[in-house]
Amino acid sequence: MTALAILWQRHRLLLGGFLGATLIALFFAARFLLSVLYWSDPAHRNQPLEGWMTIGYIAHSYEVPRDRLIEILDLRPPDNPDRKTRPTLERIARDRGQPLDALEKDIEAAIAQLRAEEQAR
């Protein structure tokens, strides 16, 4: 008998737990690898701002601290708990009652400010 068959006969719960843990580890390893491959592509750096982007995506693309970007833009979490916690630029502009172009200019100014602060260090 093979070792796997013996394990299955004697330790089904243990083998099932091990296989489950292995699948979970493979899932997170694949997710990590895809993220590394995506962000290592220079085409994803300093992308022009678009309405579908989130603040986190922009912070990652422009290599600025997300929390500081949120602070400078004076963004607050939505009061309604049913709303997404990661709104797009289109939703942020709509909630603020301003055009998307104006929000994009505010974000570009905030990014420039954060980069200037980083250079001053």
Image: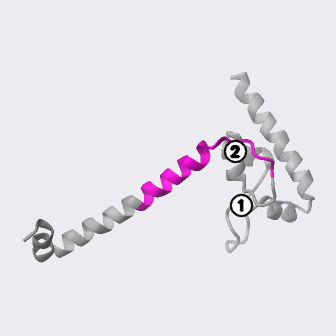
For the residues carrying marks 2 and 1, which lies nearer the camera in this image? 2
Residue at image location 70% in from the left, 42% down from the top: 45
Quarter-wise, where is residue 78 in the image?
bottom right
Q: Which residue is mark 1?
A: 77
Q: Residue furthest left?
A: 1
Q: Mark 2 falls on what kind of element?
A: helix
Q: Residues within 10 Å of mark 2 (few under 14, many from 20)?
A: few
Q: Residue 81: percent from the left, percent from the top?
A: 67, 71
Q: Quadrant of the N terminus?
A: bottom left
Amino acid beneath label 1: Pro
Quarter-wise, where is residue 11 in the image?
bottom left
- Depth check: give the residue in front, 94 or 49: 49
Residue at image location 49% in from the left, 57% down from the top: 31
Q: Residue 65: percent from the left, percent from the top?
A: 66, 41
Visual colour scheme: one colour
120 shown above or below 50: above
Residue 27, which numbered label? Answer: none
Residue at image location 71% in from the left, 41% down from the top: 62
Q: Residues within 10 Å of mark 1 (few under 14, many from 20)?
A: few
Q: Residue furthest front?
A: 1
Magenta span: predominant SS is helix
Q: Is residue 32 magenta?
A: yes
Amino acid beneath label 2: Ala
Q: Residue 59: percent from the left, percent from the top?
A: 69, 46
98 shown above or below 116: below
Residue 43, which numbered label? Answer: 2
Q: Are marks 2 and 1 in contact (CB under 8 Å)?
A: no
- Range drawn in magenta: 27-49
Q: Which sits earlier in the primary sequence, circle 2 or circle 1? A: 2
